[in-house]
């Protein structure tokens, strides 16, 4: 059994890092009988400074039969300790998550190259997409220039979730970059059968489960609701606040909302509670500026919850599929129109959308080719 040494800023038992963490945790779960994973990560969750209380910091923790995790404390996070740990660890493949983190994305490449590692794979997690590059553009363009100057990604493979992300990677790293396209894996679980949830004409329960940030377009979502004056609308927002200033701008809009719209901030939610939470709502409402995959969107379908999202994700043509709507961010009026349509849906109309969402999820989850795509990341080309 091959051993995969992986570096990631935040991992289980954390949950606030969202899709990056979910994608890797799902992958590890699916490959429990195929690969041994040794994971190096922080001993804190995303946006937190308090260490986990149920892990042994600065030591290897055996958490599953195929998983050992080393949780670095802040005080022991230094180049000497990283070099020592990599030197003492036996592995076949290096699998590095993200691109901008010095400790968990950049330094690991130098260290595993020094060990003459034959296969190094970097997961960009959408960080080279135009929606991501637009945040802190100057620093990211400088980073791209320096990677080419230093040859950081020479002889490194990239994992892209789809062909669009592959194009994004080539546009930043170089047209000859070695890329393996493998769609991200869903949660390994048996999905529940469809159950009716109450939906009356004139009411709408919306939910967002994502970090609160410009990339997720939280403020844009709230602005759209200012023009929704029909029915009773509740919008519950879950997720860590990444940018307090941005969240302040969002909250300033609350007083401008019509009286029929109510927004509640619910804080962060553990990953194992997401599906149950989604089942309490009529639609996920997430007009994101871009996703290379969108795990919570898939989870929404898995929870029989249709979605109202932007067209900047791989989940496309949803109206034709009867699972919701994907709408251009330039079409604000169309967003409002579809929100009003959702308000007016009666029980029979909503049930059809909800049932379609679950069937769509089952079709994706049961696609056996996803496993083979992901195995290609860790196996030499034949």
Image: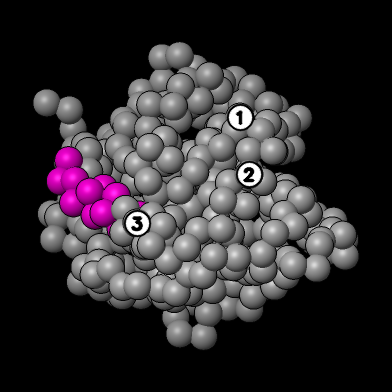
Magenta span dominant secondary structure: helix
Residue 34, relative to residue 192: is it above or below? above
Secondary element type, mark 2? helix
Q: Quickly name the residue at label 3.
A: 352
- The answer to the question of whether label 3 and label 2 lie on touching residues, with beta carbons closer than 8 A, is no
Give the Cα distance between marks 2 and 1. 27 Å
- Depth check: 260 or 202 in front? 202
For the record, the magenta segment spans 357-369
Q: Quickly name the residue at label 2.
A: 337
| Residue 169 x %, y % | 48, 26
| Residue 5 x %, y % | 33, 52
Q: Earlier in the sequence, mark 3 or mark 2?
A: 2
Q: Residue at x 63, y 44 (%)?
A: 337
Q: Quickly name the residue at label 1.
A: 130
Instruction: Tell which residue pokes out farthest to the bottom in this image.
Output: 53
Q: Name the quadrant containing residue 266.
A: bottom right
């Amino acid at each position: 059994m091959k051993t995969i040494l992986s570096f990631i800023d935040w991992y289980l038992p954390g949950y606030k890092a969202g899709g990056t963490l979910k994608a890797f945790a799902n992958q590890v779960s699916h490959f429990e009988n195929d690969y041994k994973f040794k994971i190096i990560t922080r001993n804190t969750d995303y946006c937190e400074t308090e260490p986990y209380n149920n892990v042994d910091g600065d030591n290897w923790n055996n958490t599953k039969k195929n998983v050992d995790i080393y949780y670095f404390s802040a005080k022991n996070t230094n180049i000497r300790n990283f070099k020592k740990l990599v030197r003492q660890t036996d592995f076949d493949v290096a699998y590095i998550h993200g691109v901008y983190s010095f400790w968990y994305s950049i330094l690991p490449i130098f260290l595993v190259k020094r060990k003459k590692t034959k296969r190094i794979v970097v997961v960009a997690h959408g960080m080279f997409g135009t929606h991501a590059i637009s945040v802190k553009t100057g620093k990211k363009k400088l980073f791209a220039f320096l990677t080419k100057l230093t040859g950081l990604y020479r002889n490194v493979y990239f994992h892209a979730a789809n062909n669009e992300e592959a194009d994004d990677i080539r546009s930043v790293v170089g047209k000859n970059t070695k890329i393996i396209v493998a769609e991200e894996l869903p949660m390994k679980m048996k999905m529940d059968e469809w159950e009716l949830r109450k939906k009356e004409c004139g009411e709408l329960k919306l939910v967002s489960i994502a970090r609160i940030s410009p990339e997720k377009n939280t403020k844009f979502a709230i602005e759209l609701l200012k023009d929704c004056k029909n029915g009773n609308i509740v919008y519950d927002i879950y997720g860590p606040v990444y940018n307090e200033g941005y969240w302040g701008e969002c909250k300033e809009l609350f007083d401008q909302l019509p009286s029929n719209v109510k927004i509640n901030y619910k804080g962060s939610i553990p990953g194992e509670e997401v599906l149950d939470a989604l089942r309490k709502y009529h639609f996920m409402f997430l007009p994101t500026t871009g996703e290379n995959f969108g795990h919570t969107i898939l989870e929404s379908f898995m929870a029989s919850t249709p979605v109202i999202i932007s067209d900047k994700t791989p989940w496309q043509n949803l109206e034709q599929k009867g699972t919701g709507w994907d709408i251009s961010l330039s079409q604000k009026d169309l967003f409002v129109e579809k929100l009003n349509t959702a308000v007016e849906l009666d029980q029979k109309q909503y049930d059809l959308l909800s049932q379609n969402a679950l069937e769509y999820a089952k079709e994706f989850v049961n696609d056996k080719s996803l496993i083979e795509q992901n195995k290609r990341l860790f196996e030499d080309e034949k």
